[in-house]
Amino acid sequence: MKKIVVLSGAGVSAESGIATFRDANGLWEGHRVEDVASPEGWQRNPRLVLDFYNERRKTGQHAQPNAGHLALAGLEKHFDVTVVTQNVDNLHEKAGSSRVIHLHGELFQSRSTADPTLIYDLDGWELNLGDRCEKGSQLRPNIVWFGEMVPMMEVAVEAATGADVFVVVGTSLLVYPAAGLIDYVPRPVPKYVIDPRLPDVAPRPNLHLIEAKASVGLPRLAEELIEQYAR
Ligand code: APR
């Protein structure tokens, strides 16, 4: 089976009602990154950080996958699909994608502050001061904050170097190392970028820019890929 590797960003969840970061009314309009998504912000004011992620869980807990997520899940019938996402929501999984690599963590998980290997699924949307891991330390959101290592990047690079087709959808390609993943895709491999406001991506061989929303561009591309590689 041909290998398809996808890099998704907040834009793929926009039509599911989840705010992006840098569009108008984006998440970074109402909050300073350094206050709510950095280790320093956590040290300074853990309550503010917990409230920021509680609010995102509360508003996002009932979000449903859109036609874009579903198109990617449907590709698994014909291809070996790996979704590398910058998103912390679980909409790719809800849509049925079975291999999802979360570069920036998972919103509905918490993590021990004493032992980062202790990760817990959250039931419900709240994580509060006083919620502790089995070793008695405060739990934090299982999110990769700015300035922290991206542990899954190595796995993502390995997938990208082995891709037969590479798809970028719904990301401004402004945050590294995620934005650099496309540079690991071999030159002859077709690369598609889907976004209603195309990000600034360096010209390269076999690059196809598709100016469309995820819910339109992904189903259309899926059809094309099935026609081309799987009929
Ligand atoms: N369909 C597809 N793309 C869309 C849609 C849509 N309906 N609506 C908006 N977009 C595009 C925007 O044009 C933009 O290019 O989604 C992208 C969203 O960009 P950002 O808000 O910067 O989100 P993202 O690229 O995922 O941010 C990367 O930055 O703040 C950190 O950790 C955070 O994972 C996040 C990372």
Image (spheres, rainbow, N blue to C red):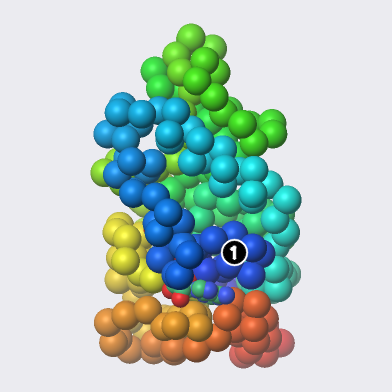
Q: Position of residue 36 (x, y in %)?
A: 38, 41
Nearest the camera: 98 or 172? 172
Using the rendered view, name the quadrant where residue 69 is placed.
bottom right
Using the rendered view, name the quadrant where residue 151 is placed.
top left
Which quarter of the rendering shows the N terminus? bottom right
Q: Is the residue 211 above or below the residue 129 in the image? A: below
Question: Could you tell me which secondary element the residue under label 1 belongs to?
Answer: helix
Q: Position of residue 26 (x, y in %)?
A: 46, 62
Number of numbered discs present? 1
Q: Is residue 37 visible?
A: yes
| Residue at the spot of label 1 | 13
Q: Is residue 167 left or right of residue 154?
A: right
Q: Position of residue 123 (x, y in %)?
A: 69, 31
Residue at 52%, 15% (x, y): give it: 130
Q: Position of residue 214 (x, y in %)?
A: 59, 76
Q: Residues within 10 Å of mark 1 (few under 14, many from 20)?
A: many
Nearest the camera: 56 or 207? 56
Q: Is the residue 135 above or below the residue 229 in the image? A: above
Residue at 27%, 82% (x, y): give it: 202
Using the rendered view, name the quadrant where residue 180 is placed.
bottom left
Q: Is the residue 15 above or below the residue 197 in the image? A: above
